[in-house]
């Protein structure tokens, strides 16, 4: 793979929050981006290994974004196997999206890195804090539009990260040099409670919204009533009762070290977001 010529990158989760942004940036820069998903033109089903080789055909690099989360049981083994197939298919570089403070996710990182090393791939991990886009286009957006976001979290602070910054760092790792074998830990510029973040988004959009802390069992019951699967509900329990315990409050200089600029603030993201997204 050359970082100077035209490259082809398979973007898993290609229609998701980060994958869609990585795809757009690669294409704007004159490279070929192939978004892959279970229902897309390039089909990729993590539960269907028989289709992996077809998805990987022609890829020089792979952007790995696994849903619902790297911390779910079996994710690391699945992605390690996929990474091995990527190496066999001729890919030379893999960039993995991961999460901060999740032991399960970090175990998955190690499995992917080992598979990449065994196959001669360069690997980079992007270990990220919660996305600012959760409030504007992701899981929290419908509740924000209704005026109240209720979650089982209290005064814990999180340095919410703009997904556009993640995509910019991913571009650097996919196309540039100096990122092989590195873990880039990425955060926004300041840590906010969820209540503070909701207030920032409401102020920036001019749409009133407030935050309410609710018991975890009440939250999980609401997810069950909405048809959310057992594994995703257990992931939510893990995130809200264990990961959001203050371990991820500190900010990092990861975005600045890679991009040479400060990360975007939550309010700045909201002001720049398209009206349809907020």
Image (cartoon, grey):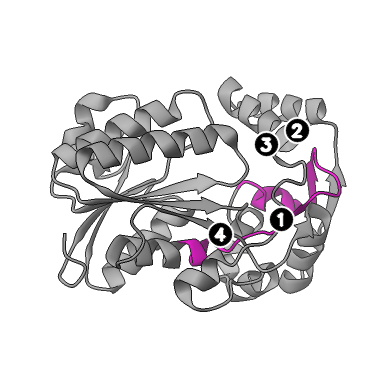
Q: CA distance from mark 2 to mark 1?
A: 26 Å
In the image, which residues are magenta?
139-166
Q: Which numbered circle lies on residue 186? A: 4
Which badge, 3 or 1, comes first in the chain's sequence?
1
Q: Are marks 2 and 3 in contact (CB under 8 Å)?
A: yes
Which residue lies under the disc numbered 1?
145
Q: Is residue 52 left or right of residue 150?
A: left
Q: Residues within 10 Å of mark 3 (few under 14, many from 20)?
A: some
Q: Residue at x 73, y 37 (%)?
A: 240
- Residues at marks 3 and 1 touching, judged by CB atoms closer than 8 Å: no
* CA gap, disc 2 and disc 3: 6 Å
- Can residue 95 be seen? yes
Task: Say which element carries label 1.
Answer: helix
The reply to whether the magenta stretch includes residue 158 is yes
Q: Residue at x 77, y 32 (%)?
A: 219
The image shows residue 180 at horizontal and vertical percentages of 33, 56
Query: Magenta span has 125?
Result: no
Label ID, residue 241? 2
Q: Nearer the viewer, mark 1 or mark 4?
A: 4
User: In what element is the residue under mark 2?
Assistant: helix
Residue with the mark numbered 3: 239
Q: Earlier in the sequence, mark 2 or mark 1?
A: 1
Residue 239: quadrant of the picture: top right
Between tags 3 and 1, which lies in front?
3
Q: CA distance from mark 3 to mark 4?
A: 18 Å
For the residues labelled 1 and 4, say whether their Cβ atoms are less than 8 Å apart: no
């Amino acid at each position: 793979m050359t970082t100077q010529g035209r490259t082809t990158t398979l973007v898993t989760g290609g229609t998701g929050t980060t994958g869609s942004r990585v795809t757009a940036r690669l294409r704007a820069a004159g490279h070929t981006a192939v978004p892959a998903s279970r229902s897309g033109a390039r089909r990729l089903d993590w539960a269907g290994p028989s289709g992996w080789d077809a998805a990987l055909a022609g890829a020089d690099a792979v952007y790995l974004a696994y849903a619902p989360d790297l911390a779910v049981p079996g994710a690391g083994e699945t992605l390690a196997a996929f990474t091995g197939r990527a190496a066999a298919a001729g890919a030379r570089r893999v960039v993995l999206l991961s999460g901060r403070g999740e032991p399960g996710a970090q175990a998955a990182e190690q499995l992917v890195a080992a598979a990449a090393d065994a196959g001669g791939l360069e690997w980079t991990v992007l270990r990220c804090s919660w996305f600012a886009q959760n409030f504007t286009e992701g899981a929290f957006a419908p509740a924000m539009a209704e005026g109240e976001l209720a979650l089982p979290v209290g005064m814990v602070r999180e340095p919410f990260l703009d997904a556009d910054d993640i995509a910019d760092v991913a571009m650097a790792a996919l196309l540039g040099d100096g990122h092989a074998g590195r873990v880039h830990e990425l955060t926004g510029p300041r840590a906010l409670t969820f209540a503070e973040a909701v207030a920032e988004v409401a102020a920036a959009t001019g749409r009133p919204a407030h935050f309410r802390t609710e018991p975890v069992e009440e939250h999980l019951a609401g997810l069950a009533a909405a048809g959310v699967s057992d594994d995703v509900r257990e992931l939510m329990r893990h995130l809200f009762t264990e990961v959001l315990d203050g371990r991820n409050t500190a900010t990092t200089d990861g975005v600045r070290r890679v991009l040479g600029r400060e990360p975007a603030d939550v309010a700045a993201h909201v002001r720049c977001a398209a009206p349809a997204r907020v």
